[in-house]
Image: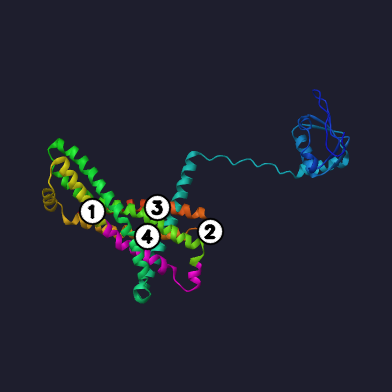
Amino acid sequence: MDRTLPGAQPPASDESVAIAGDLTIRQLGALPDRARQARRLDLSRLGRLDTAGAWFLAGREGDGVRLEAVSPEHRGLIDLVAARVPEPKAPPPEPPGIIRLLSALGLWTVKILRQSRELLGYLGRFLVALGRSLRHPSSFPLTALVHHAQETGMKAVPIAALMAFLIAVVIAFQGATLLTQFGAEIYVVDLIAISILRELGVLLTAIIVAGRTASALTASIGSMKMREEIDAMRTLGIDPERALFVPRILALVITLPILTLIADLSGIIGGAAMAWITLGISPPLFLSRMIEETGIWHAFVGLVKAPVFAVIIGVIGCHAGMSVGKDAESLGRMTSEAVVQAIFMVILTDALFSIFFAQVGI
């Protein structure tokens, strides 16, 4: 046998395979397959043996392979390595399905409560920073406020108006199809006016703004945190809450009610146009019916929700931006989470508003 490379003789049935030469980490990779598959290994001509070769022989012996003619020195090293090989730990038993369900529910509940506490903390930080800005008008970020109002308000007008118009068209068409069966076509006016003014105008606008602005807030603040600009602001004595939170959230509070009014007007126009086309209800008749039968409080209910939705969207976006880590992956993850959380909280808050106004009779 070659003394520099482990070799093996082909086995005949249960014939012993002899390994000759050194068996170290350098020669172990070139060991023939017949030596790896043999059931008996003759080590009488084995040369130098290191821990890698001993680990291989110990493993083969553990698999039931018989090691023959092992010298005392080789046997001692093989036994030492075999004693140091850790035994694999058995996986823990799988808990029952109800336990896994309760555990997942508990973890989800803890996560929601922790996140709610953090959002309340960011709301408090915004209010404190707003109070400081109002007490010191000279330091109020007016330029940033105007910029963000344009970004969140002016640029969202086309999509908000178009969405409200199309939704009102769908409501008018579906309402006309159903109410015509009962000879109550005129009630399409009430259906459109109440649904748009009270719920859909502000809700659709808030969802659109949540998709646009929550992601934009997270991306802008998160990228600043990744580049350590926020740390630099603190070093320079600039309050990040006043410089970043106040103009963004306050711009939302100002522009979202305006966007809601635009969406309401666009929805009324779309519903009136579809009622005229499908039912022959002229715009003057539509307008007079809406004024007579639709109370002003329906529009008031919709407008009251807008500032609350704006604060929710702004706080969630700022919180997600400040939660971004040092990598781009966390920026993308927090951006998507901010949009999902903002839309969910807007819908949940709208449901709570509906229950409240129903209880007080508005």
| Among numbered discs 2 and 3, the one appearing first in the sequence | 2
| Element carrying mark 1 | helix
Main SS of residues in magenta: helix
Q: Residues within 10 Å of mark 2 (few under 14, many from 20)?
A: some
Q: Are marks 2 and 3 in contact (CB under 8 Å)?
A: no
Q: Residue drawn at (43%, 58%), measured in percent from left and top? A: 218
Q: Is residue 362 visible?
A: no
Marks 3 and 1 sit apart, C-alpha to C-alpha, by: 23 Å
Q: Position of residue 16 (x, y in %)?
A: 83, 28
Q: Quadrant of the C terminus?
A: bottom left
| Among numbered discs 1 and 4, the one appearing first in the sequence | 1
* Left-right relation of 223 to 130: right
Q: Amino acid at mark 1?
A: Asp
Q: Which residue is mark 4?
A: 314
Q: Which residue is mark 2?
A: 326
Q: Are marks 4 and 3 in contact (CB under 8 Å)?
A: no
Q: Are marks 2 and 4 in contact (CB under 8 Å)?
A: no
Q: Residue drawn at (30%, 51%), measured in percent from left and top? A: 204
Rendered position, 321 above or below 277: below
Q: Which residue is mark 3?
A: 339
Q: Residue drawn at (53%, 40%), measured in percent from left and top? A: 95
Q: Position of residue 85 (x, y in %)?
A: 73, 43
